[in-house]
Every structure is written in C-alpha cells, then in structure tokens.
Image: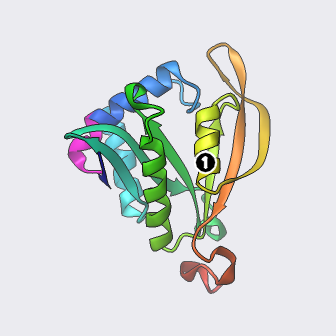
C-alpha cells in the first residue's frame, strides 16, 4: 500500500467509499451521498486552497482517503484545519487510517498549518477516536445529541493536535493580525 496525493481519476472510488459511510455509518452527518461531480468540486476547492488530499492505494485501488480542510470560515481560524478520513469497509482496522493520518499531519505541517481538529461523528466511533489519540490528538470535549441520523441522536467528539511549533510563531498568512 502507498499513500499518495489524490488524483482526478480517484474520484469514483472516493465517491463509493464516502457513499457507504453516508448510507450506513455515523462518521459523517451527511444524509445523502454526493455525486461524483460534487466530490470532484469538493476536491478542487480543497486543492485550490492548498489543503492536502491523500489516498491509500493498494495495488492501484483506492481503499481509503483523507484530507485536511477549512476548520472555520473566519480568517483568524485559517491556520487551523479539520481532518477527514474514510476507509473502505473491507480495509478498516488494518492500519490504513493510521498511515493516512500520519502523512496528513506531515503535509499539513509542511503547508504551515498550526492546529488540526478532528470532529468525530458519533461518540461510539471508538476506532476513529483511538486512531486520533494514537497520533497525538487530545480529547477537547463532546457535543451531546447534536446530529440526528439513523433514527437516533448522535454526539460529536472534538479532538485537537498541534502541528509543528504551533504556538511559537504566528501563522504567516495572517501575521498582520
């Protein structure tokens, strides 16, 4: 397996992985699977803003993907990113998420982002919470019963990890603030 940058041709496999998570899971609070066109637009928007977007490629097949994106629209937050990781259901628990998150942290740090936030859908998503803890994320808190999906209320778990020197110097793109 290799971790590499997402390419346009990966979108059909990414769309299928995400659709399964939307339809059957609680990691995302999205209720309808987006189309390939919509997933292409989302990818293009991330890449246009210098956010990392990675895939786990096993023998030419995308079995997982991860990206860092905007945490909040207000400019003072632009040094902070939110991560998203999705793994094909047949490859979960095999280390793909770990390798994707490790590389995502490296790439976000190289792009001068200062903090990474994980917004874990569903406090019962123990795999994602454990994955983030292993990569140095700290539990910040739980927002209780904030999403309704599959006939029940779901919590959201907030986790955070500094990138690079984090607090030791200003975010270069906003050093005028």
Q: Residue furthest top?
A: 151
Please check the rendered image and state whether residue 121 is part of the magenta-colored stretch, yes or no. Answer: no
Question: Residue 155, image x and y in percent?
Answer: 73, 31
**Which residue is pictured at 20% across the width and 43% down the height?**
9
Question: Residue 133, image x and y in percent?
Answer: 65, 49
Residue 11, compared with residue 17, is above or below; it is below
Please check the rendered image and state whether residue 9 is part of the magenta-colored stretch, yes or no. Answer: yes
Q: Quadrant of the C terminus?
A: bottom right
**Which residue is pictured at 67% across the width and 30% down the height?**
122
Q: Is residue 155 left or right of residue 33?
A: right
Q: Quadrant of the N terminus?
A: top left
Q: Nearer the viewer, residue 5 or 69?
A: 5
Residue 69, compared with residue 65, is above or below; it is below
**Which residue is pictured at 64% across the width and 84% down the height?**
169
Query: Dividing the picture into quarters, in which one does residue 94 lie?
Result: top left
Q: Determine the main secondary structure of the stretch shown in magenta.
A: helix
Asked whether the viewer can see residue 55, the reply is: yes
Q: Residues within 10 Å of mark 1 (few under 14, many from 20)?
A: many
Q: Is residue 121 left or right of residue 42?
A: right
Q: Nearer the viewer, residue 55 or 93?
A: 93
Residue 63, compared with residue 137, is above or below; it is above
| Callout 1 secondary element | helix
**Which residue is pictured at 20% across the width and 40% down the height?**
59
Q: Which residues fall within the magenta stretch? A: 6-12
Question: Residue 162, image x and y in percent?
Answer: 64, 66
Q: Disc count in the image?
A: 1
Query: Dividing the picture into quarters, in which one does residue 154 lie?
Result: top right
According to the picture, the residue beneath numbered tag 1 turns out to be 132
Question: Residue 77, image x and y in percent?
Answer: 64, 65
Residue 115, compared with residue 2, is above or below; it is below
Q: Is residue 130 left or right of residue 92?
A: right
């Amino acid at each position: 397996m290799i971790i590499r940058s997402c390419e346009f041709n990966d979108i059909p496999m990414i769309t299928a992985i995400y659709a399964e998570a939307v339809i059957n899971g609680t990691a995302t609070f999205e209720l309808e699977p987006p189309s390939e066109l919509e997933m292409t637009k989302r990818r293009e928007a991330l890449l246009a803003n210098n956010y990392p977007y990675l895939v786990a490629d096993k023998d030419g097949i995308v079995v997982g993907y991860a990206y860092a994106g905007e945490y909040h629209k207000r400019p003072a937050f632009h040094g902070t990113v939110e991560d998203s990781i999705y793994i094909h259901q047949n490859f979960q628990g095999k280390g793909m998420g770990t390798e994707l998150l490790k590389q995502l942290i490296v790439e976000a740090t190289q792009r001068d982002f200062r903090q990474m936030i994980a917004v874990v859908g569903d406090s019962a998503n123990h795999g994602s919470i454990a994955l983030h803890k292993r990569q140095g994320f700290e539990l910040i808190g739980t927002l209780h019963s904030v999403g309704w999906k599959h006939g029940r209320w779901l919590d959201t778990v907030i986790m955070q990890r500094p990138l690079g020197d984090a607090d030791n110097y200003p975010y270069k793109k906003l050093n005028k603030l």
